[in-house]
Image (tube, rainbow, N blue to C red):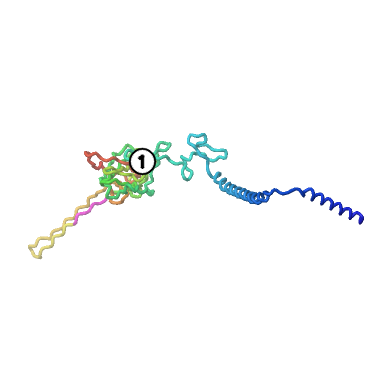
Amino acid sequence: MTDDQPGAARAEHELRTLLHRAVATVEPDPAALGRIRHAVPRRRARRRNAWTGAVAATLLAAAVVPALHAVRPFDLSGGTTAGSTDAHGADRTPRATRGSTGGPRTAPLPAQPDGRPIPSADASGSTAATDPGSTAASAPAAVPACLRTDLGRATAHLEPVDSAGSTYGYFTVRNTSARSCGVTGPGTVAATAGGPADQTRIKVVDHIAGDAATALPAPAAVALPIVLGPGEGYRVRFGWVPEGTCPSSAPRAGAAAPEAPATAAASSGPDAPAAATAEPSPSPTPTADPPSVTVAHTPVGGDPTAASTVITGSCGGTVYRTAPETVPAESPTAVATPGPSR
């Protein structure tokens, strides 16, 4: 092995010398160093831009993809998807008919010639009655609310008793001011017993479809406030349906006349006349008031009562009242007179 080592060293030296001779004539390009100095920074800048673009695209995708899932597709009215259900069972009702909470949105009500909306009827042909106990909407800023002093010229009209024993009528209240104002509530209808009538057997309720007051018009929804111009008014209808009979009771005794004072006795003596004897007082005259119910209407502004009417012959029953309805202004020749009351 020791004899081979000098030979191996010489072979390596000769190979190295051959390689050096092979590249001895190779010279670098004089512009190569300049190109390297410019190419390396450019390559590094391209890599940085590529990484920056990739990161920006990732962030943009992360922000856009959830938004795309949240946004519903455009539903065009009259399109094939309007009012249909997609493959996942989601409601595809057009946005134009959807409210803020997802429920159906009613279309705007048509306007009357004086600008007030016309109540819309439901599918059955009637509209829901307005709850008089609900909070009334406030009048628009352009039209002030009617004060109690603005409402007057009230009349009460009472129809004859029908074959079923029921009585119907209405109250009319007008705007007596020189300005337009809004009635912000339906007011109240009260019934008061008179004579032997029993107040505990008298009720006042709202008229609804199918109740006992069959002669009243179908319940109608009223948009409050009701704007009344000068001379215009509103009307509240009512129906009295008696229930039960009056209990038999003895006539109420009338007030008795005061007794006549006795004449004082004369002075004693043989010729003195006898003392006058006082005559007995007359017996009280029995009287009895007939049973009656006074139905009265008070506008939303409160007392005083606008109009009232008296219904006789019943001791108990129910007063059915309707929502207010507008009444046009009277003609110059018309004279407002209260209707017959019973």
The percent position of residue 41, horizontal first and vertical second, equals: 64, 51
- Residue at image position (48%, 36%) is 77
Q: Which residue is mark 1?
A: 117
Taking the view exactly as shown, the residue that stands out farthest to the left is 271
Q: Which quadrant would residue 340 be assigned to in this image? A: top left
Where on the picture, by quarter, is residue 309?
Answer: top left
Q: Quadrant of residue 326?
A: top left
* Vertical order, 7 against 341 (above or below): below
Q: Which residues are magenta?
A: 252-258
Horizontal relation, residue 9 to residue 224: left or right: right
Residue 247 appears in the picture as rendered: no
**What x and y, as percent, mark residue 10?**
87, 53
Q: Quadrant of the C terminus?
A: top left
Magenta stretch: dominant secondary structure:
loop
Q: Residues within 10 Å of mark 1 (few under 14, many from 20)?
A: some
Residue 308, position as x, y percentages in the image = 28, 46
Count of numbered marks: 1
Q: Secondary structure at mark 1?
A: loop
In the image, 242: left or right of 178?
A: right
Confirm whether the magenta stretch covers residue 26.
no
Query: Is residue 254 part of the magenta span, yes or no?
Result: yes
Disc 1 residue type? Answer: Pro
